[in-house]
Amino acid sequence: MNRLEVYDPVLGNSSENLRVQQLLDMARGIKDRLIASPEEVTRELGHYAYFNGGEYGVFHVVRDEQTVAALTHTAWFDDSLQFNAITVSPEHRSEGVARRIIYTLARAAMARDIDDLWVYALRNSHASKIYTQLGMNVPPLSDERHPHHSRYYPMSASPRCVVERVGDIEPMELIGQLPPYVS
């Protein structure tokens, strides 16, 4: 699991799209969804991408030998990288996959001179603990770039801080094009 691939639901096959939707549901806390038609799954993934970054958003997947094992959706802006969703399938948790995904994308953000990486997390969740270990903190309430939303709160750090905090690990190979720069 060394490749972080751009994933386009329009080009993906129906079984992979269903798996991507299942992982996205895990990230969003959605349980017991009824299986929809392949067209509906593709449409819903497209809607998620459109409303969470539009042309600046991208799904990335990590595959194991059989299937999609991890997923992230990010939005790439001129001065920030926003993680909208990140999840690892239960059978691959505690293997450092999420840490490597974040590390790999933080390095890509640094290459684009992005100085702000952020994510929304549930308070006291496993994910928020990982983000804290990566040097992410809750920004002050006066930081208007990161509004607080109900039970979710923003966590933020510079990509450089995340890369330094993670240390010397092997980044994943990025496969595919990142979204264009905001103009």
Image (spheres, rainbow, N blue to C red):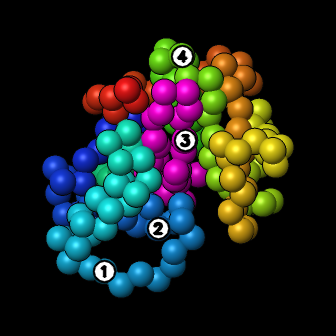
Going from the N terminus, do you reach mark 4 or mark 1 first?
1
Read off the residue under disc 2: 25
Give the Cα distance between marks 3 and 4. Answer: 14 Å
148, above or below 140, in the image: below
* Circle number at residue 82: 3
What whole-number distance in Å separates the C-alpha atoms at marks 2 and 1?
Answer: 12 Å
Residue 28 seen from this side: yes
Using the rendered image of the protein, determine whether residue 107 is visible from the camera's viewpoint.
Answer: no
Mark number, residue 1: none
Does residue 114 appear to the left or right of 7 in the view shown?
Answer: right
Secondary structure of the residue carrying numbered label 1: loop
Q: Residue at x 59, y 51 (%)?
A: 93
Looking at the rendered image, the disc whose residue lies closer to the viewer, 4 or 1, is 4
The residue at the point 36 percent across, 54 percent down is: 49
| Mark 2 / mark 4, whichever is N-terminal | 2
- Kindly identify which residue carries mark 1: 35
Label placed on residue 113: 4
What span is colored magenta in the figure?
A: 69-97
Image quarter hosting the C terminus: top left
Q: Please, what secondary structure does the residue beneath circle 2 have?
A: helix
Question: Secondary structure beneath disc 3?
Answer: strand
- The local secondary structure at tag 4 comes to loop
**Where's residue 55, x and y in %?**
32, 42
Question: How far apart are the two marked residues, 4 and 1, measured between alpha carbons?
Answer: 41 Å
Q: Nearer the viewer, residue 144 or 15?
A: 144
Q: Mark 3, mark 2: which one is toward the viewer?
A: 3
Of the residues shown, which amino acid type is indicated by label 4? Asp
In the rendering, at what x and y percent does residue 138 appear? 79, 45
